[in-house]
Image (cartoon, rainbow, N blue to C red):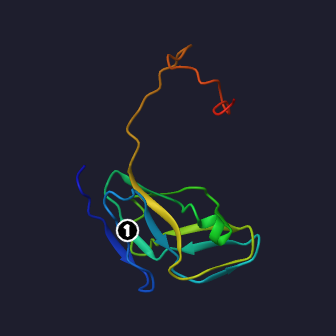
Amino acid sequence: MNKQTIRIKYFTDKIEKLTYIDGKSDWIDLRAADNLCLKKGDFALVPLGIAMELPQGYEAHVVPRSSTFKNFGIIQTNHMGVIDESYCGDNDQWFMPVLAVRDTEIHVNDRICQFRIMEHQPTISFEECDRLDGSDRGGFGSTGRA
């Protein structure tokens, strides 16, 4: 796989710079760029303090870290953010939309979510059929039955 260079703008010097550790993880942590105090039921856009120029044909997928709910009691309201390469202007800061399920505080530089860069879906076509040739796993919810 060839290495891509991505131009990044930081909106603050209070968060750690992004780092990619080759071979360790395909996901890169994002940090809160502002302090927020949320009450149970509050909605907020958590500023992530960055904007990027993604390569043509790529998009970023933004999701919570595995510890985000445990540590902060928030859920990402769109469950996965998709940022395409056209969201690349000088003021196109990334945000994480969240809903607080308990009173919580988020501080500048808290690792709040993560992202990865993915190629856009290739052009596809659908072919209708009456039967599929794959092995039948038993339908939705059947995995793990004793």
Foreground pick, 57 / 146: 146
Secondary structure category for the residue under label 1? strand
Foreground pick, 78 / 92: 78
Residue at point 45%, 81% (across, down): 15
The residue pinned by badge 1 equals 52
Q: Which quadrant of the view contains residue 16?
A: bottom left
Residue at point 40%, 60% (across, down): 86
Residue 65 percent location from the top left of the image: 54, 63
Q: Which quadrant of the view contains residue 101?
A: bottom right
Count numbered badges in the picture.
1
Vertical relation: 140 (above or below) 104: above
Vertical relation: 129 (above or below) 77: above
Q: Which quadrant of the view contains residue 67?
A: bottom right
Taking the view exactly as shown, the residue that stands out farthest to the top is: 130
| Amino acid carrying mark 1 in the image | Met
Taking the view exactly as shown, the residue that stands out farthest to the left is: 2
Vertical relation: 115 (above or below) 17: above
Residue 45 percent location from the top left of the image: 60, 72
Q: Is residue 128 left or right of residue 75?
A: left
Residue 9 percent location from the top left of the image: 36, 76
Residue at point 60%, 56% (across, down): 79
Taking the view exactly as shown, the residue that stands out farthest to the bottom is: 13
Is the C terminus in the top left, top right, bottom left or bottom right quadrant? top right
Vertical relation: 117 (above or below) 131: below
CA neighbours of label 1 inside 10 A, class few (<14), some (14 to 19), many (20+): many
